[in-house]
Image (cartoon, helix red, strand yellow):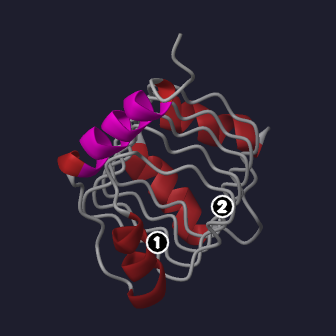
Amino acid sequence: MDVREDLLRMLRRGRIDEFNDVSARRQHIIDLSNAELTEARIEGADFRGVTLDGVKLQRAHLGGCDFRGASLRFSNLEAADLEGADFTKANLYSAYLARAKMSGATIHGADVCAAVFPDDLHPEEIRLSHEKGTRLRHDPTVALLRQIQELLGRGAGPRS
């Protein structure tokens, strides 16, 4: 019996209660590194302390998931729904979170070195969540200002 494959099958089929039950009773480290879970619907999953390094979770529905102490190094969470997720003390080293929905998420004490965050998160929001445990809030004007700066920067070249 391959526990890893059984757990991934549970997640892919949306059997979150079953997964959470196994996760809560576990007596060993759960390693789901490099798993393919793109577009999975796994809201409310208990990933506390789970190793998810290099996992592919693009466009996945992960609202309310508990990632406390989990390792998500080099994971791809592009455009994932992470609203209300808890990343307290998680390892997000080099995680790719561009275009992710992170309203209400927290990254208190997480390793966010080299992580790529969504454009609509103000750096001060990220800092406060990291240092004080506040919930992240999206600010659409931040993304718009970055786009304007980028466009202005492109047009600043030499004129003929």
Image spot of residue 40 (x, y percent): 45, 30
Type of secondary structure dominating the magenta stretch: helix
Residue denoted by label 2 = 50
Q: Residue at x 62, y 33 (%)?
A: 56
Q: Which of disc 1 and disc 2 is earlier in sequence?
A: 2
Is residue 149 depicted above or below 22 in this figure?
above
Instruction: Tell me which segment is drawn in magenta.
Output: 142-153
Going by the numbered disc 1, the residue's amino acid type is: Ile
Viewer-side label of 2, 1: 1
Residue denoted by label 1 = 107
Is residue 74 depicted above or below 68 in this figure?
above
Image spot of residue 89 (x, y percent): 58, 78
Quarter of the image for the N terminus: give it: top right
Is residue 89 depicted above or below 120 in this figure?
below
Instruction: Please state if 98 lies on the left or on the right of 51 as rendered.
Output: left
Q: Is residue 19 magenta?
A: no
